Image: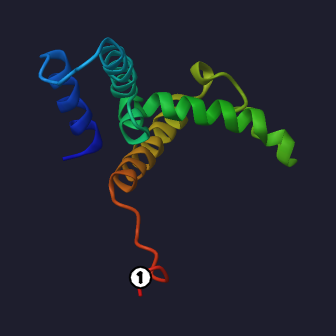
Amino acid sequence: MTDRDALREALTHIRDADAPISSWDGWREVQRLRDIAAAALATPPPAEALAYASDEQIAQRFHAAYERLAPTFGYETRRESAVPWSDVPSSNRRLMTAVAGEVRAALTASLAEPPPEDEEAVE
């Protein structure tokens, strides 16, 4: 069971009044925790957030950031590509969108995997 599943289950118990509450202060604390948990569940974790963005949205943001940051690194981009996303040639947009899709898929997969164990910590 994931942490999100445990939160959902706890919220169900609270909503269904299965949680034992012995005082008014206890009830207010349960309400406060319920609100915190509901807010946490409403915000997707990073891996899920990537899934909500389309490949084209990611490509468009990458393009805008790339064009904005290139001069900072002493790089001058091609005149044809130094334009708003809607004016980028369609073949370039399709390529960047395909690349963004592959990167998004790889990031989503890697974020879903458990982190590797620290070999030095295991003795």
Judging depth in this view, the residue of 114 and 13 nearest the camera is: 13
Q: Which color scheme did the rendering employ for the protein? A: rainbow
- Whether 54 is drawn above or below 28: the answer is below
Residue most toward the bottom? 123
The residue that label 1 is drawn on is 122
Residue 121 image position (x, y, % from top left): 47, 79
Q: Indicate the amino acid at tag 1.
A: Val
Rendered residue at 12%/16% (across/down):
16
Q: Is residue 69 left or right of residue 1?
A: right
User: Splitting the image into 4 quarters, where does residue 5 fall?
Assistant: top left
Instruction: Identify which residue, 10 or 5, lies in the foreground.
Output: 10
Which residue appears at 35% of the width and 60% of the height? Answer: 114
Percent from the top left, x then y, of residue 85?
60, 24
Residue most extreme to the front? 23
Picture residue at 28% right of the left edge, 37% below the top? 4
Residue 101 place in picture, x, y as percent: 40, 42
1 and 30: which one is in front?
30
Left or right of 69: which side holds 3?
Answer: left
Q: Residues within 10 Å of mark 1 (few under 14, many from 20)?
A: few
Q: How many marks?
A: 1
Horizontal arrangement in the rendering, residue 89 relative to residue 109 (left or right): right
Q: Is residue 17 above or below residue 69?
A: above
Task: Establish if 43 lies above or below 102.
Answer: above
**How far across and how far down the image is residue 39, in percent?**
39, 21
Residue 50 versus residue 41: which sits nearer the camera? Answer: 41
Residue in the image at 36% along x and 16% along y = 25
Residue 90 shown left or right of residue 53 in the figure = right
Q: In the figure, residue 8 lies in which quadrant? A: top left
Q: Quadrant of the C terminus?
A: bottom left
In this rendering, the answer to whether 67 lies above or below 102 is: above
Q: Secondary structure at mark 1?
A: loop
